[in-house]
Amino acid sequence: MSATPREHTRTYYLGKLATELEQRGLSAVLRPYPPALRISHPDAAMLAETVDCVPHSEGWSYRWSWGEVVGLADDPAHAAERIVRVLAARR
């Protein structure tokens, strides 16, 4: 099965977020279909979260597994900071 342009865009944005998260010491593994990131802290793998990327009228946004928006896909650094804070609060 070949990926659609929408899936390529989603994967592109998730890859940018994964890079930002890894620079902050988190593990981010791309799930291929449907594209999403499995994010965890290397020292506390039980504290994990899944983030996907969805289109909307103004562009694309990262979204938590429960549906709340994490941040705009055009600003992966800001979204990564928010994810780091949420996972740190759970520790």
Image (tube, rainbow, N blue to C red):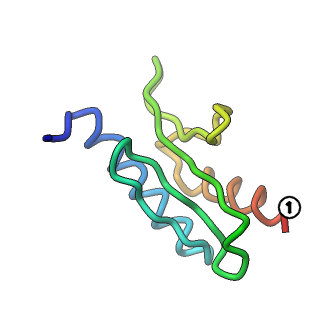
Choose top left, top right, bottom left or bottom right for residue 8. top left
Choose top left, top right, bottom left or bottom right for residue 46. bottom right
For image coordinates 68% across by 56% down, the residue present is: 83
Q: Nearer the viewer, residue 90 or 59?
A: 90
Vertical position of residue 25 compared to residue 59: above or below:
below
Does dot 1 land on a helix, a strand or a loop? helix
Is residue 15 rendered to the left or right of residue 86?
left
For image coordinates 73% across by 65% down, the residue present is: 47
What quarter of the picture does the C terminus occupy? bottom right
* Coordinates of residue 61 in the picture (x, y in percent): 52, 35
* Coordinates of residue 18 in the picture (x, y in percent): 47, 62
Q: Nearer the viewer, residue 54 or 75?
A: 54
* Coordinates of residue 38 in the picture (x, y in percent): 53, 58
* Coordinates of residue 56 in the picture (x, y in percent): 47, 22
Is residue 65 rendered to the left or right of residue 12?
right
Amino acid residing under circle 1: Ala
**Which residue is identified by label 1?**
89
